[in-house]
Image (cartoon, grey):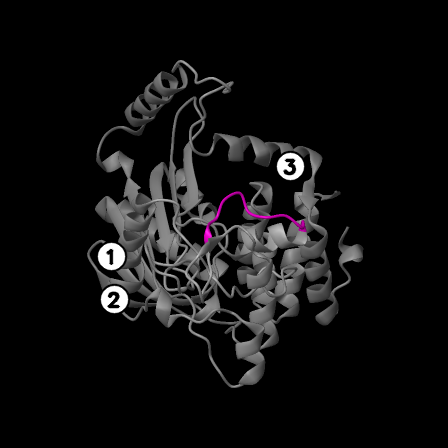
Amino acid sequence: MQLESAEYLKKVYKAIWQGWSGPEHQAEAFANAILAGDLLGQDMQGMGIAMIVHLMAQHDQINYTAEPTVEQDSGNHLVINGNRGIGQYVMTRSMEMAIEKAKQHTFGIAMVHNWHDIGCASAYTRMALEHDCIGILTVNSVTQTAPWGGRELKMSAPPFSYACPAGEMLPLLGDTSVSGIYETYLSKAVLEGRKLDSKCVVDPDTGELTDDPAPYIEHPEHRAAPMLAAPVFPNVKLYVMNVFLEMMTGLLTPGGFTSPQMEYPSMHILEEDPEVQVKRGGGAFIMVINIADLMPVADFKAKVDEWVRTIKASKLQKGFEEVLLPGERAWHEEQKRLKHGIPVQANYWQGIKDMAAEVGVDIEALR
């Protein structure tokens, strides 16, 4: 598989954003957030997300010069309007503002609406680590799964991320989707000519579960491949958590909206009505906790280290070589990719080349 350096990919991402007439200071945030997914081995939240941004750019859905505006500022919380700006920049600025609030009030909260795709959620929660804070973030998404017992696309596939500092041990880094699977998993299976690992997609006509995604995915080569059937939750506990995150994002955010009110970035919608403004960025909940206001930071980090060592010292299940904490595998993968290069999927790389060519960027000249 093709390998590219992180330094080179960052140059490419910045050049493409500026080619779209995005401001230089936003280009840095865009490139950092896209690269974060690539480095952690989650290219569907890195380079793949750039393909969705490209689709929005092609149809004039993004306000390239938008700056987030604060609609409410009271005590420890903010309500922020992204003004249809690029999600990577909007969420970076929102996290920065939440960190400032936490420094003033121990707990800083930002509720955000009206942006375009954020990509890798831990790109933002990790920012809190630089300030010896805990960062928490979740956003709702377009409909990607069925409600428990249902067969229609009605529910979000929300990312949920946290970052917690440690001392000698690695920071705790959680970054997961609170759903089963979503379009990228279906697309990958179709492109590889295989079925899914379980019967986790419900046929919209019969209500029967199937493990064959092929009839239900269009344009599997694109990150924003429309689904014609809904994946289901693997268990009811994940469904319960999903509802909670919708409550904290789309329902609670002033000016926000829920997943069923959002529109999938489908080429069909955008091509049929060139004047449409699709609803994106329904709601985000960000919390930052300033540890220093609760106890000495060194004491907290020592507690985290002791707890991590206790967990990792557990006797192993058969077939396991090590107990891993959330984020460990990702931290190691990031270091490996920084040193040896980032593997690039052919279809995602072709998308990047198409973006660059459209705005006259010679990506080979950036090497």
Which amino acid type corresponds to the residue marked 2 in the rendered image? Gln
**Which numbered disc, 2 or 3, marks the residue that appears first in the sequence?**
2
Residue at mark 2: 72
Q: As displayed, is residue 193 above or below residue 15?
A: above
Of the numbered discs 1 and 2, the one sitting upstream in the chain is 2
- How many numbered discs? 3
Q: CA distance from mark 1 to mark 2?
A: 8 Å
Q: Are marks 1 and 2 in contact (CB under 8 Å)?
A: yes
Q: Is residue 240 left or right of residue 350?
A: left
Q: Please say whether residue 82 is visible from this viewpoint.
A: yes
Q: Which secondary structure is most common in the magenta stretch? A: loop
Q: Residue at x 35, y 60 (%)?
A: 150
Picture coordinates of residue 50 (x, y %)? 59, 59
- Specify whether residue 154 is painted magenta: no
Q: Which residue is mark 3?
A: 337
Which residue type does callout 1 highlight? His
